[in-house]
Image (tube, rainbow, N blue to C red):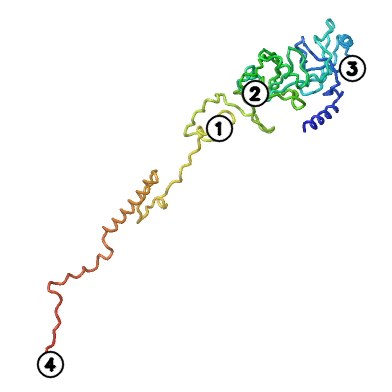
């Protein structure tokens, strides 16, 4: 999988102009030192591969210096190849008449030397890499003052030669575009795996990418700004600070509430226009009391207390109904109970009375 991807990247590189973007046979003058702060040329990353529209194919530095002196009083055009993103650009530099020099220290070097970089993918806590200050994802090891490091196994061999000894490394950080010199002490007894305690990436997928257009934001700064359409006007910020709330309007003022802090609204400071109920008339049903119903008062109480009041109210209504006189109170009173002695006895006929 990775072999096919590397072949695809090499095919794309071969179609680039001048065929020098990533070819192993391409050569150029690598910038080792730049004494002119006005020239936007970075040491180690930039290679001079052309001059005045022509590709440089001769490693003789005298020919290059002669071409620069011939442009005294005018400007010279340099073709630069950058290891950051493997890009080619042109740069016009004015050459003074008094000192026809660019102030650059150059070395004829293959462009493929910049491919020997190691990408820091992960750093274990309390490891030699962590103590040295290596950062994951953003740091690239590009070289060392101890000598040349070539190939994927070059860094491992260098680390083995410096076990328990300080080792200086040139580290480039992609996020901040800064190259720094770190000192690390490889060790096998730090308590983890590896002599450095970090995961390294090497190859076409781990080359130095193109620089970021803007540096990352520091902690506490705004990362994104609010988007605004082309037909929108820029908001007018009040003279007061965003942390200060506006004064509360009086009851006679009308209109929408003022905004706080530009386009943002604070809900606690928002005020709405009070709408009074319509006036009540004498004939309106609102003023007429309801007959035959007892007004029930609603209070903000808990559900348990509401149920108790509901049952008490029903019990009270039941007692009132029991104590109230009956609707048939106008009828006659019930008859008195019978007298003592019981009911009258019936007369029994005797045989004497029968004829």
Q: Which residue is mark 1?
A: 265
**Residue annotated with mark 3:** 57
Q: Secondary structure at mark 3?
A: loop
Label 2 packing within 10 angstroms: few (<14), some (14-19), many (20+): few
Label 4 element class: loop
Image location of residue 261, percent across then percent down: 57, 28
- The label on residue 256 is none
- Front-lying residue, 143 or 347: 143
Between disc 1 and disc 3, the foreground one is 3
Q: Residue furthest front?
A: 189
Q: Which of the two marks, 2 or 1, is nearer to us in this view?
A: 2
Q: Residues within 10 Å of mark 3 (few under 14, many from 20)?
A: few
Is residue 279 or residue 96 the one in the foreground?
Answer: 96
Residue behind mark 2: 193
Callout 2 secondary element = loop
Distance from Cα at disc 2 to Cα at disc 3: 47 Å
Q: Which residue position is annotated with label 4? A: 354
> Distance from label 2 to label 1 (Cα)?
55 Å
| Camera sees residue 243 | yes
């Amino acid at each position: 999988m990775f072999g096919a991807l590397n072949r695809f990247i090499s095919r794309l590189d071969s179609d680039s102009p001048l065929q020098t973007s990533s070819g192993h046979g391409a050569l150029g003058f690598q910038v080792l030192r730049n004494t002119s702060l006005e020239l936007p040329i970075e040491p180690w990353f930039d290679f001079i591969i052309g001059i005045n529209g022509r590709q440089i194919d001769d490693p003789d530095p005298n020919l290059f210096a002669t071409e620069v002196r011939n442009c005294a009083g005018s400007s010279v055009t340099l073709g630069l190849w950058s290891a950051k993103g493997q890009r080619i650009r042109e740069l016009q530099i004015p050459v003074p008449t008094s000192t026809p020099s660019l102030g650059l220290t150059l070395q004829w070097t293959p462009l493929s030397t910049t491919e020997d970089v190691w990408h820091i993918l992960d750093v274990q806590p309390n490891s030699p890499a962590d103590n040295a200050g290596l950062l994951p994802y953003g740091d690239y090891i590009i070289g060392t003052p101890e000598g040349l490091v070539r190939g994927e196994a070059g860094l491992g061999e260098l680390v083995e030669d410096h076990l328990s000894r300080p080792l200086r490394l040139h580290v480039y950080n992609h996020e901040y575009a800064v190259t720094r010199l770190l000192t690390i002490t490889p060790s096998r007894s730090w308590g983890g795996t590896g002599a450095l305690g970090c995961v390294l990436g090497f190859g076409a997928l781990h080359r130095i990418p193109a620089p970021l257009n803007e540096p990352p934001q520091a902690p506490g700064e705004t990362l994104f700004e609010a988007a605004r359409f082309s037909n929108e006007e820029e908001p007018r910020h009040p003279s007061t600070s965003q942390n200060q709330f506006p004064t509360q309007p009086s009851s006679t003022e009308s209109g929408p509430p003022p905004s706080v802090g530009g386009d943002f609204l604070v809900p606690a400071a928002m005020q709405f226009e009070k709408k009074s109920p319509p006036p009540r008339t004498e004939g309106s049903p609102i003023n007429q009391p309801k007959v035959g119903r007892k007004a029930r008062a609603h209070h903000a109480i808990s559900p348990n207390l509401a149920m108790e009041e509901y049952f008490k109210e029903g019990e009270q209504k039941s007692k009132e109904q029991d104590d109230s006189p009956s609707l048939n109170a106008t009828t006659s009173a019930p008859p008195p109970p019978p007298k003592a002695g019981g009911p009258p006895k019936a007369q029994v006929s005797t045989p004497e009375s029968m004829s």
